């Protein structure tokens, strides 16, 4: 974002106290330190202004967060181009105020990364997320607390029903939770929320990363929504670094029927998907192949495609690829510059 914008906003929607009972740092401190430690922002030529908004409903937690951030500022003085604001309030009303004020001025929200990490099912209406998504270059990382939804979804209280309706932006979740098979319920609930983030919120790309507790029960699922191919690529790389075996833990919603066949150091799964998609189609460009891997598979086009999949296919005896490299480029196996054309045998 910083490469193309003079201002970036980071929103932590459920910020917490900054530090927890056992001394663990909360997300606000982690985020600010990640910025300060990032070599991209060390250059004196960097002109991008970074603004942090930390929203916290509980007054004591908000006050504790202010103290933690002040202490961090003493230990590591913030550059003049970094600022933060701790907002005491609930995410949805506070975010609505911000968006209303911006829209009244006829402006749009600056490029924003919104980390929306609630403790349960309430306070995260899809409509607010949709309003963020309607602004160019804005992304959301959302914690979908499935365990809380499944535990409370069957209760009759109108207040609970309303919150979950707002979470999904539809009442269809009620049918989803009626099933008796736990894994099927999880799969359908995740797919419904993913579909709503695309169709109702308007995100072009949505990726999931499932988190299981120590007893191997689904606890929550992270949803990343973006309209940027670059943002999608970067997030997929981060997910694969966190989970080198599948890049998604146990869940992928790119294709509900798609399996990730990857073993550590072995990209046979991507090989299979590429051959299934492109074999018999003649020559296709490397750009078309990259788009397919990025947008329609669980794999990372940056991490898995060229050296770990295409190069071994080309070096097979006989080769399983025919490669036409652009004029003036070295005809070296394993090299696939822009404009390369490939046919899968």
Image: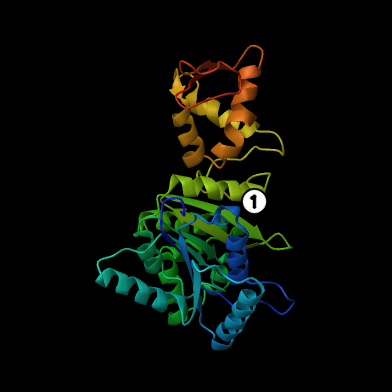
Q: Nearer the viewer, residue 283 or 30?
A: 30
Q: Which residue is mark 1?
A: 249
**Which residue lies at the image location 55% right of the left edge and 31% below the top edge?**
273
Q: Is residue 18 visible?
A: no
Coloring applied to the structure? rainbow
Image position of 247 with respect to 316: above or below:
below
As drawn, the residue found furthest toward the bottom would be 60
- Total numbered badges shown on the rendered structure: 1
The image shows residue 233 at horizontal and vertical percentages of 52, 45
Position in image of residue 58 (x %, y %): 54, 85
Categorize mark 1 by other alpha carbons within 10 Å: few (<14), some (14-19), many (20+). Answer: some
Residue drawn at x 60%, y 50% as measured from the top left: 238
Residue lying at 73% horizontally and 76% vertically, measured from the top left? 23
Query: Outermost residue toward the front?
Result: 44
In the foreground, 16 or 191? 16
The C terminus, quarter of image: top right
Q: Quadrant of residue 133?
A: bottom left
Q: Residue at x 49, y 28 (%)?
A: 277
Choose between 191 and 29: the one closer to the eye: 29
Q: Is residue 126 above or below residue 319?
A: below
Residue 301: x and y in percent read: 54, 37
Q: Is residue 202 left or right of residue 337?
A: left
Vertical arrangement, residue 6 with respect to residue 335, above or below? below
- Taking the image as drawn, is residue 107 in sight? yes
Q: Position of residue 175 (x, y in %)?
A: 45, 62
Residue furthest to the top? 318
Query: What secondary structure is found at the residue carrying circle 1?
Result: loop
Drawn side of residue 310 relative to residue 338, left or right: right
């Amino acid at each position: 974002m910083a490469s193309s914008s003079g201002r970036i906003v980071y929103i932590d929607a459920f910020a917490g106290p900054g530090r927890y009972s056992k001394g663990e740092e909360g997300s606000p401190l982690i985020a600010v330190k990640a910025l300060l430690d990032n070599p991209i922002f060390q250059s004196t030529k960097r002109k991008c202004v970074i603004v942090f908004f930390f929203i916290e409903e509980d007054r004591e937690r908000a006050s504790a967060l202010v103290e933690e951030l002040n202490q961090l500022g003493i230990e590591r003085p913030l550059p003049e181009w970094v600022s933060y604001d701790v907002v005491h309030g609930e995410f949805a009303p506070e975010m609505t105020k911000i968006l209303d004020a911006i829209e009244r001025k006829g402006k749009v929200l600056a490029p924003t990364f919104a980390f929306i990490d609630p403790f349960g099912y309430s306070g995260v209406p899809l409509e607010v997320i949709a309003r963020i998504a309607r602004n160019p270059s804005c992304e959301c990382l959302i914690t979908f607390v499935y365990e809380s939804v499944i535990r409370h979804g069957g209760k009759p209280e109108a207040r609970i029903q309303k919150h979950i309706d707002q979470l999904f932006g539809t009442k269809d979740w009620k049918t989803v939770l009626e099933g008796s098979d736990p894994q099927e319920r999880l799969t359908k609930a995740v797919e419904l929320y993913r579909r709503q983030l695309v169709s109702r919120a308007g995100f072009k790309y949505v990726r999931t990363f499932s988190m299981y507790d120590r007893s191997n029960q689904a606890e929550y699922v992270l949803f990343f929504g973006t309209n940027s191919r670059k943002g999608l690529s970067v997030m997929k790389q981060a997910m694969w670094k966190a989970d080198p075996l599948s890049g998604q833990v146990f869940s992928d919603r790119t294709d509900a029927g798609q399996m990730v066949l990857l073993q550590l150091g072995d990209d046979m799964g991507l090989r299979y998907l590429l051959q299934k998609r492109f074999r018999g189609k003649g020559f296709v460009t490397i750009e078309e192949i990259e788009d397919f891997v990025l947008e329609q598979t669980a794999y990372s086009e940056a991490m898995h495609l060229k050296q770990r999949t295409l190069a071994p296919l080309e070096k097979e005896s006989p080769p399983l690829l025919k490669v036409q490299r652009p004029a003036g480029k070295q005809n070296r196996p394993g090299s696939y510059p822009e404009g390369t054309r490939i046919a899968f045998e």
